[in-house]
Amino acid sequence: MNPRSIQLTNEVRPLALPWILIMLGGVVTLIPISRIDYSWSPIDLLNWILPLGCFVGIPLLAALPLGNEFQHRTFALLLAQPIDRHSLWLRKMLIALAAVLPASALYLFSFHKDLDSRDDFWMAAVWIVAASAGSIAGTLIARSAIGGLALSCGFYGIGFVTWSRLADSYRKNGEISSGFLWATAVVLICYATVLVFIGRRMFLRYQAADGIHSTNDLASHARFLPQFISNWLRSRPRGAILNLIRREFHLLRIVWLLTLFSFFTWTCLALFHLVRTNADEFGPEPLAAGLAVILSFLIAVLAGSLSLGEERNWGTHAWQLTMPISPSTQWAVKLVFALSASAFCAVAVPLGVLITRGWISGSPYSFLDHDPLWLWFVEALVATLAAFWCSCVVKGTVRAVLLCFPMLVALGLAGVLGQWMAYTAIVRWRLLIDAVTARVDPFRATRLIAILFNPPGYWWALVVVAPLLAVGLIQSHRMFRAQTEGRKLHTVRSMLPLFATVVFLTFLLGAVSSLAWQLWSEQGTIVREAHLAIETLEASGDRANLLSLQKFTMDDLAKASSLSNTTQHWLRDCTIIVRPETDSRSVPLPLIQWPYERAFLADGAPEKQAISYSATIRTSRGSECNLHFRTLNGGKNGFLSHSCQ
């Protein structure tokens, strides 16, 4: 191999894995995903691949050719080679273009193909051009690929929000004027050209005067801070835990910078009315607001991966483990600080801006979704925990960030696999399951089933989250103390316990949910058949006894209407007390106590007018079920509610 091919191989090799992952994400976005239900599923995580790959992944590819040099501390050696800097600059630019152009074409084609994202095609193209053009200059300023991505996307993100406001002011009849679009194209070309020229000028004049370990000089980054903050961030002879916390403040400096960008971005969105309110629940989400959400998600990921990733890049993590502080204490400090930074920077800052904007307009929560606020914090903390785990597995911030997204998708797919296995097992072992459920009283299991299917509770999620969190924390603590292995097989092997945990727990939860749903459906069938029989008896009975209590048995119900074998089995030797009620249009519909009481529309006796009644069914096994039926405007159907225990 000649020297030029060796240099090209060294340049391309670090880019190969990130480029393959981003291209695979682009291929996944081309696969249509259709679902017939509206409940959340782990498969919904695949919808994040398109915006994250386009607005974060492609600019990151543009920053990696120079960012890898800073990551591996070889930038000074690169400049020391007997090669003209113009040639080095040209080589870096060509490699960046070769990586960015195929990925851009793939993601833009996916934007154009997706009906929901087709309107944002040109905005995505503009973002790719502007953010990729500024990645090299940002990387030289921040001395890291993640820092270059943050500076490039942050500066252009604020400009993009401003442009969105200007575009709304020039919009007529739902369309932007052609003159404004041509002016935007000229400004974009000038913006990208200037950034490329600035990056080239900085590269040609760059001097690595601080030496090969300059990126580890944390004190140099505090020169822009006020004096009292700089003094507090310096290490002290005493207070080992406080010194670790001060070091975490230094290591997460990019997170603080991104938080500042996020604050200005959300402030502009709120001031320029680019955030959707609750009154416009079914309206389209503005692209600028979606980009701000992606920025908050990136902050949560960096809060978990940046600290340990940077220390392992610099080679100082092994030194830290030799300090007279236990590795467990250092691990706990990093984890708690990362979670705290994520909760404040990724969630509290945007929520504070939106709540303040709503408070000024008279409704503090008018700019928030209907989801509870704690759910926002949970989502951010999950992303931070996943990134922290990835930083313990691999070496380097970029690798940890790139591993975080496939890991989240893989865990989501593991949940889908567990649910599919549960469904398949229930279908295959139907006879055995029916034999087991036939011995379970569907009336007595109502309370347990109601708690299991109670949507506001969300407690059942702990069945999956708690064991998964325990396994992940144990793994991260063990890998934090050990040397990082660079083999890809080690990464896959480390993910297997998490993957197996999610599959097993979702299989168990899916099987229990299916059995509970079967019991609940069986209870509903019994109630419907009993109701139809009661309506038939009431309609064919003596009208003089309609205002008095009546007592029926299962044999009476069977004579009035056909009953299934299941209903006859559970209502055998039962006592049914029925009290007919006077129909009145002024009587309101009954209030149900969800989730312990169910209600649905039900028909009366065939070809007869429905009759309102209240009934109590007492079985021979001691269970009880209360029924309430109200007719609708004296018609042939009504509102049936029942509560069993």
Image: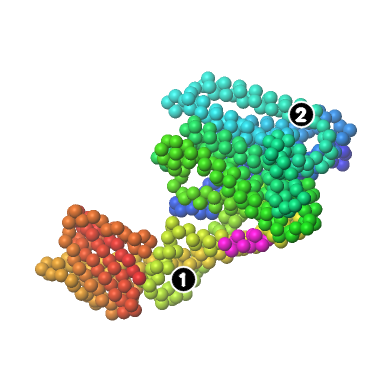
Q: Position of residue 240 (x, y in %)?
A: 73, 53
Q: Which residue is mark 2?
A: 202
Instruction: State which quadrant residue 612 falls in.
Output: bottom left
> Looking at the picture, does residue 448 appear above or below residue 190?
below
Locate residue 542 relative to residue 632 in the image: left or right. left
Q: Amino acid at mark 2?
A: Met
Residue at the spot x=41%, y=38% of the render? 362
Instruction: Note whether 233 is above or below 319 in the view shown.
Output: above
In the rendered image, residue 454 lying in the magenta stretch gets the answer no
Q: Nearer the viewer, residue 233 or 18?
A: 233
**Any part of residue 285 in sight:** no
**Disc number lying in front (2 or 1):** 2
Looking at the rendered structure, which numbered label has been put on residue 430? 1
Cα gap from disc 2 to disc 1, whole angstroms? 70 Å
- Label 1: state its secondary structure: helix
Q: How many marks?
A: 2
User: Which segment did they paint magenta?
Assistant: 466-475
Judge left or right: residue 533 versus residue 215: left
* Above-or-below relation of 590 to 246: below
Q: Quadrant of residue 51?
A: top right
Mark 2 or mark 1: whose residue is earlier in sequence? 2
Q: Is residue 279 visible?
A: yes
**Coordinates of residue 630 in the picture (x, y in percent):** 23, 59
The spot of residue 239 in percent (x, y) is 72, 53
